[in-house]
Amino acid sequence: MSKSPNASESAKPARALSETFLSGFKYEIGNRAFALLTMKGISGRLAGDRRNLFWNSYYELEKFNQPRYAQAARMLGIDPSVGWGPKFRGWLIGHTPKALLGTLQKYVYPKTIAYLEELKAAAAAGPAEAAPLLAYMVEQEEVQIEMMRLALADEYERIPPLLAEFLNKHRR
C-alpha cells in the first residue's frame, strides 16, 4: 500500500460491502483525519518539550497513514473525503492547553483500547482482497495504543524507536 495510484486512476465502482465494514472503514477514515489535525496542532506547539516525542511521533504516524487509507478507499470504491466534523474536532483538540495534555491522554487511552475492538470487527467484516490494509489498520491502532501507554508511563524516549520499527516494516 505504499505506492499511490496514478492521478488518472479513478476509484473503482462501489461494490457490495458489508455494512459493518463500510461504516467502520468510513469512521476510521474520519478518525485518521481527526487524529492528523489533532497531532499536527499539538506537536507544533511542543517544540523542545520531551512530551513531543509522543505527539510528534503520533503526527508522523498519521502522515504515514493518510496515503494508505486514501488509496485503499479508492480501491474499494469508497470516497475518502471527510466532512467538517472530524476536521473541526481535530483542529479544536489540537489546541488543547499544554497543561491539560496529560489529562487528555488519560481520557483517550481507554477509549482507544475499546475502539481497537470495533476496528477489529470492521476489519473482520472486510473484503478478502483488502486483507493487507485491514491488518495494517489494526496494527497501526495497536502501535498508537503502545505509544500512548509509553507516554503515560513517562517512557517518552522509547516511542520514536517503536514508531520507526513500524514505519520501516511498512515501507517495504
Image (tube, rainbow, N blue to C red):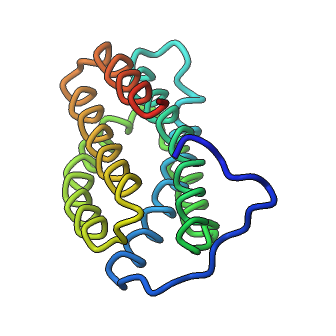
Nearest the eye: 27 or 107: 27
The front one of 38 and 139 is: 139
User: In the rendered image of this protein, does residue 7 appear above or below residue 148?
Assistant: below
Q: Quadrant of residue 170?
A: top left
Residue 31 at x, y percent in the picture: 46, 59
Q: Furthest-front residue in view?
A: 129
Q: Residue 163 location, x and y as percent?
A: 38, 26
Identity of the residue drawn at 52% across and 12% down: 48
Residue name at image x 33 percent, y 22 percent: 159
Q: How many marks?
A: 0
Residue 89: x and y in percent read 53, 60
Q: Which residue is situated farthest in the right direction here?
A: 8
Give the percent coordinates (x, y) of residue 105.
Answer: 30, 41
Q: Is residue 69 above or below residue 51?
A: below
Viewer-side residue, 127 vs 56: 127
Q: Is 6 on the left or on the right of 171, as rendered?
A: right
Q: Is residue 169 left or right of residue 110?
A: right
The structure residue drawn at horizontal position 31% and vertical position 35%, both measured from the top left corner, is: 102
Q: Residue at x 37, y 71 (%)?
A: 127
> Is residue 55 toward the left or the right of residue 159 in the image?
right
